[in-house]
Image: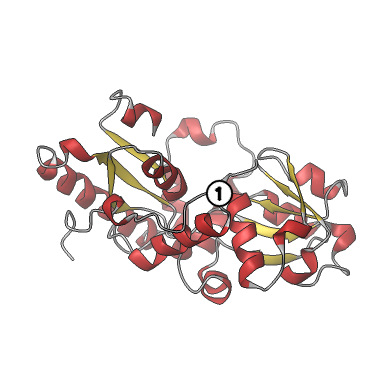
C-alpha cells in the first residue's frame, strides 16, 4: 500500500484492513476487486487450557497471543469477543509475531490467533479451535458471513484513465479464482512458482490444507461483497481504530466489475 500511495506501483494487492486504514488516514485510493473473502486466521487454545477455555466467552482474564497490536488478527479477536458478549478489555494481548505455534505449545499463552500449518500442528498437540475464520461455516456462525480480506486497489485520481486496464485485470483475477476452485488441488500446487515450495518436504500437507479451505477462502468472482467489507469496518470501529462517523463508501468502487 505504501508503494501505491507513494506512486511506486500502479496497483496494490492487500488485505482490506490495510486499505481501510490507509483510506481512513487520507489516502486517495479505491478498491475495485476482491480475491479473498476470509482472513487467514483461526482462534485456538493452548493444549493446557483446552479444558478451561471452551468458548470465546471464556477468554476473559486470559492471555492471547497475536501478531501485533492493531493488526488484523488483534482486531478480529476484539470483534469476536464483543459479538459473543465478552469484554476484550479483560484480556491480556501479547504481541508475538507470526510464529505463535511455539508460544502455544510451550504454554506461554492461553490462546492465540494462528494460520496454517500452525493450526493443524497445534490441534494435533491437543489445542482446541474456538473459531476458524478460514472456514466459511464458522464465518457464517460467528461473524454473520464472509469477512473481506484480499483485494486490489488503485489511486483514485487514475481510476478513469486506467478503467479499461482495471477491467482486464479484474477479468484475469476472476479466471484465476475460477481455476483455483475448479482445478484439483494437486494441479493448483503444481502450478505454483517452484521457488515458493523449493526444498519443502511438506507438499502433502500443503495439498491437504488447500483442499480443505480453497472453496471457503476464494470467492467465485472478484466482485466486492459490501456486507463482507462492512463487517471489517464494524470490527475496526469496535476496536476503536475508526471513528464511528467515518464513511468508507468512497473506498469501494463497485462499478468496475459488471454486477
Task: Tell which of 44 and 120 is nearer to you.
Answer: 44
Task: Tell which of 21 and 104 is nearer to you.
Answer: 21
Going 20% across and 52% down the picture, which residue do you hit?
171
| Residue 43 drawn above or below residue 143 | above
Going 87% across and 62% down the picture, which residue do you hit?
49
Q: Is residue 191 left or right of residue 251?
A: right
Specify few, some or many for label 1: CA neighbours under 10 Å numbering under 14, 14-19, or 20 or more: many
**Looking at the rendering, which quadrant does residue 158 occupy?**
top left
Where residue 196 appears, as percent x and y from the top left, is 50, 34
**Location of the C terminus (image quadrant):** bottom left
Where residue 166 appears, as percent x and y from the top left, is 18, 44
Q: How is the image coloured?
A: secondary structure
Task: Examine the rendering and report whether any part of residue 222 can be seen.
Answer: yes
Task: Tell which of 250 and 199 is nearer to you.
Answer: 250
Going 15% across and 62% down the picture, which residue do you hit?
258
- Name the residue at the front extreme: 245
**Location of the N terminus (image quadrant):** top left
Q: Is residue 232 left or right of residue 153?
A: right
Where residue 176 appears, as percent x and y from the top left, is 31, 51
**Looking at the rendering, which quadrant does residue 227 occupy?**
bottom left
Task: Tell which of 88 and 19 is nearer to you.
Answer: 88
Q: Which residue is mark 1?
A: 72
Task: Examine the rendering and report whether any part of residue 217 can be seen.
Answer: no
Amino acid at each position: 500500500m505504501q508503494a501505491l500511495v507513494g506512486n511506486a506501483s500502479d496497483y496494490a494487492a492487500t488485505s482490506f484492513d490495510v486499505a481501510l486504514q490507509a483510506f481512513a488516514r487520507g489516502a486517495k485510493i479505491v478498491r475495485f476487486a476482491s480475491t479473498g473473502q476470509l482472513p487467514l486466521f483461526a482462534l485456538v487454545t493452548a493444549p493446557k487450557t483446552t479444558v478451561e477455555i471452551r468458548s470465546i466467552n471464556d477468554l476473559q482474564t486470559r492471555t492471547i497471543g497475536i501478531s501485533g497490536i492493531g493488526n488484523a488478527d488483534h482486531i478480529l479477536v476484539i470483534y469476536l469477543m464483543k459479538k459473543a458478549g465478552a469484554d476484550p478489555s479483560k484480556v491480556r494481548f501479547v504481541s508475538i509475531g507470526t510464529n505463535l505455534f511455539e508460544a502455544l505449545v510451550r504454554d506461554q499463552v492461553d490462546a492465540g490467533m494462528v494460520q496454517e500449518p500452525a493450526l493443524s500442528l497445534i490441534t494435533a498437540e491437543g489445542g482446541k479451535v474456538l473459531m476458524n475464520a478460514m472456514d466459511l461455516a464458522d464465518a457464517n456462525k460467528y461473524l454473520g458471513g464472509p469477512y473481506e480480506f484480499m483485494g486490489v486497489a488503485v489511486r483514485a485520481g487514475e481510476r478513469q484513465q486506467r478503467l479499461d486496464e482495471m477491467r482486464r485485470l479484474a477479468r484475469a483475477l476472476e479466471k484465476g479464482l475460477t481455476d483455483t476452485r475448479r482445478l484439483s488441488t494437486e494441479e493448483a500446487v503444481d502450478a505454483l512458482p517452484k521457488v515458493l515450495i523449493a526444498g519443502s518436504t511438506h507438499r502433502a500437507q500443503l495439498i491437504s490444507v488447500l483442499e480443505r479451505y480453497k472453496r471457503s477462502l476464494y470467492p467465485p468472482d472478484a466482485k466486492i461483497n459490501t456486507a463482507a467489507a462492512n463487517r471489517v469496518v464494524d470490527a475496526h470501529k469496535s476496536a476503536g481504530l475508526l471513528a464511528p462517523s467515518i464513511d468508507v463508501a468512497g473506498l469501494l468502487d463497485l462499478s468496475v466489475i459488471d454486477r
